[in-house]
Image (cartoon, grey):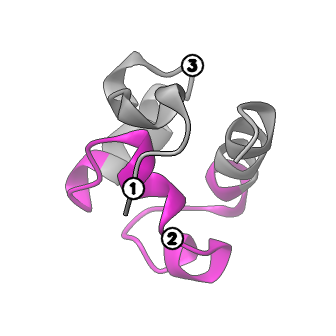
Amino acid sequence: MAVKYPAMKGKIEDTPLSNRTKNCLRAADVVTVADLAQYSPAELRSFRNMGEKSVKEIEDFIAGIGI
């Protein structure tokens, strides 16, 4: 996947996402925003301990950076 937006190069750890969401993403080996952008909400829900609030938080974050 070509990096279209500079923010996509950023690491998940450097985002304003909650610690709980970051922990779920880390456990699923999601390291960068570009990695995160590849997943649909349904796929995110399948991650261990990923709840609706975390999925909504991720959707809002992705929309906020224009992806």
Q: Is residue 63 left or right of residue 9?
A: right
Residue type highlighted by circle 3: Pro
Q: CA distance from mark 1 to mark 3?
A: 23 Å
Residue type highlighted by circle 1: Ala
Instruction: Identify the magenta region.
Output: 26-55
Q: Earlier in the sequence, mark 1 or mark 3?
A: 1
Residue 34 colored magenta?
yes
* Pointer 1 with pointer 3, Cβ within 8 A: no
Quadrant of the image occupied by residue 48 = bottom left
Number of the label disc, if any, that sits on residue 39: 2
Image quarter (top left, top right, bottom left or bottom right) of the N terminus: bottom left
Q: Residue at x 76, y 39 (%)?
A: 66
Mark 1 or 3, closer to the camera? 1
Q: Residue at x 36, y 32 (%)?
A: 9
Q: Earlier in the sequence, mark 1 or mark 2?
A: 1
**Which residue in the protein does label 3 denote?**
16
Mark 1 or 2, closer to the camera? 1
Q: Residue at x 76, y 52 (%)?
A: 56
Q: Is residue 25 left or right of residue 45?
A: left
**Which residue in the protein does label 1 denote?**
2
Secondary structure under tag 2 reads loop
Secondary structure under tag 3 reads loop
Residue type highlighted by circle 2: Tyr
Could you say where residue 41 lies in the image, as x and y percent from the top left? 65, 72
Q: Is residue 34 left or right of residue 29?
A: right
Could you say where residue 33 lies in the image, as x and y percent from the top left? 44, 42
Could you say where residue 16 lies in the image, as x and y percent from the top left? 57, 19
Q: Residues within 10 Å of mark 2 (few under 14, many from 20)?
A: few
Residue 51 colored magenta?
yes
66 relative to 59, above or below:
above
